[in-house]
Every structure is written in C-alpha cells, then in structure tokens.
Image (spheres, rainbow, N blue to C red):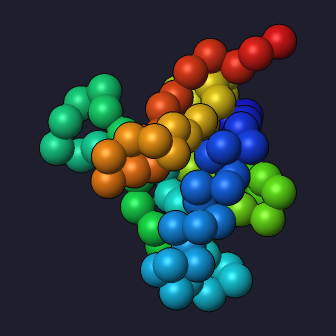
C-alpha cells in the first residue's frame, strides 16, 4: 500500500485546512483519464466508494481502487519549497 512521508502528511493537512475541508476530507489520488500513465491529485470532502483510505499523522489520503495496485510499492512525498507548492512526488518506498 502507498505510504506517506512526514513532509507529505504535513502538506496534506495544511492544504486540507486552507481549503476548509471537513474532517472526512483529504487528498485523493487517481489515474488521469486524459493522460495515460499519469495521476491526478485533488482535495476532496470525502472518499469515493471503494477508495483505499490512508491515515498518516492526521492527514488523509484517498487512493482510487483502480490506482491502488500501481502505487502499492511507492511513497508520497512533498517538497514544501516548490514555487506555488507543495510539490508532490511518488518515489519507491524506503525499505
């Protein structure tokens, strides 16, 4: 299952608070319908039916069931220094 770094947890919490999301909200990751092999990230008020729900230090990340296998050995990280940031990246999990 996708893991979430401390930087990404902080970024998701901050973005969710700034967006005024309810406690059930968070960041959702799904495969892009327009661009094969790409992922879309969106702040949403709740999980879609069938989403995997990852709670990481008070931050919630939803992964669509169709996308979950592709992300199973990856980790979500964030770089808070990216202009307009944070910049999210998917990298192999650290063992």
Identify which residue is drawn at 39% across, 50% down. 85
Name the side, left or right, on which 18 lies relative to 73: left
Identify which residue is drawn at 62% across, 25% down. 74
Q: In the rendered view, tell whether residue 9 sits above or below residue 42.
A: above
Q: Nearer the viewer, residue 80 or 36?
A: 80
> Going by the picture, which residue comes out furthest to the top?
95
Quarter-of-image position of residue 82: top left
Name the side, left or right, on which 92 lies relative to 20: right
Q: In the rendered view, tell whether residue 23 sits above or below residue 72.
A: below
Q: Nearer the viewer, residue 17 or 4?
A: 17
Q: Is residue 36 visible?
A: yes
The quadrant of the rendering that contains the N terminus is top right
Residue 40 in picture, x, y percent from top left:
35, 48
Residue 37 in picture, x, y percent from top left:
31, 27
Name the side, left or right, on which 83 lies relative to 25: left
Residue 59 in picture, x, y percent from top left:
71, 62
Identify which residue is drawn at 74% across, 43% down. 6
The quadrant of the rendering that contains the C terminus is top right
Q: In the rendered view, tell whether residue 61 sits above or below residue 6.
A: below
Name the side, left or right, on which 30 lies relative to 37: right
């Amino acid at each position: 299952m996708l893991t979430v770094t401390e930087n990404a947890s902080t970024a998701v919490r901050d973005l969710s608070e700034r967006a005024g999301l309810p406690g059930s909200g968070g960041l959702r990751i799904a495969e892009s319908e327009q661009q094969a092999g790409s992922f879309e990230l969106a702040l949403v008020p709740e999980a879609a039916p069938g989403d995997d729900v990852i709670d990481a230090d008070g931050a919630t990340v939803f992964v669509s069931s169709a996308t979950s296998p592709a992300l199973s050995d990856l980790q979500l990280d964030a770089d808070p220094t990216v202009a307009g940031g944070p910049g999210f990246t998917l990298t192999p999990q650290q063992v």
